[in-house]
Amino acid sequence: MMCSTGIAWCSFTWEAFATLAAGFMAVFAAFIVGLRQTQILMRQAAIQELAVRSELFDRRYENYETVRDFLQAALSLTSEPDQAARDKFFTAKREARFLFGPEVHDGLDLIWKNCSEMFVASSLVAKGFAPEGYDYQAEVKRKYEYFRKTSAAFDGLHDLYHQLKLDI
């Protein structure tokens, strides 16, 4: 039998074949394990992204609830929101800058301005305060106008917080 001058195929033994086969299997197994680890890492990254999105949603919803509670208290015909509710509103307004786009913060600014005007008008009407040039009927109309604007803001709150809507 003739053997070539490169690899001596005729002297190839079963032990050499077993060594080569084991080496190829080890490389193939390492490749499969590497693929599997890559898939696991991709799943972990997706799970981590969902966790971050879930936490962001929770913080955004908490912000929405704070504003909603403040508006409910502001629209209450019995009294104005207490200082704690106002502080929570200001905190929510400040946090909205970072949790939402600028339109939410600007909307909350407008809500606060309308509520402030409504509170002032309500206070003047309730006290019957009559400084010179004070028109009681005009103040009642002003109170009603800002009450209407605040009520419209409450009704449109879900539109202001449109980023809370889930894309499923």
Image: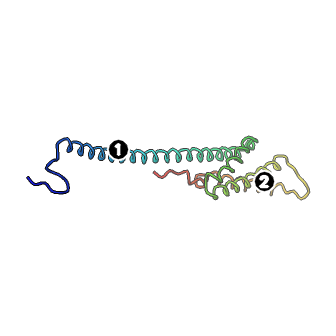
Secondary structure type for disc 2? helix
Question: Residue 85: x, y in percent?
Answer: 72, 42
Q: Nearer the viewer, residue 127 or 46?
A: 46
Question: Residue 79: x, y in percent?
Answer: 75, 42
Query: Could you tell which of marks 1 and 2 lies nearer the N-terminus?
Result: 1
Question: Residue 40: x, y in percent?
Answer: 40, 44
The residue labelled by disc 1 is: 33
Is 1 placed above or below 79 here? below
In the picture, measured across the screen, residue 126 lies left or right of residue 20, that is right
In the picture, measured across the screen, residue 155 lies left or right of residue 11, that is right
Question: Residue 119: x, y in percent?
Answer: 77, 49
The residues bearing labels 1 and 2 have C-alpha atoms spaced at a distance of 76 Å
**Residue 127 - label:** none
The residue labelled by disc 2 is: 140
Give the residue type at disc 1.
Val
Quarter of the view holding residue 106: bottom right
Residue at x 80% of width, y 55% of height: 139
Q: Nearer the viewer, mark 1 or mark 2?
A: 1
In the picture, measured across the screen, residue 33 lies left or right of residue 4, that is right
Residue at x 78% of width, y 53% of height: 140
Residue at x 67% of width, y 47% of height: 92
Give the residue type at disc 2.
Val
Is 58 placed above or below 135 here? above
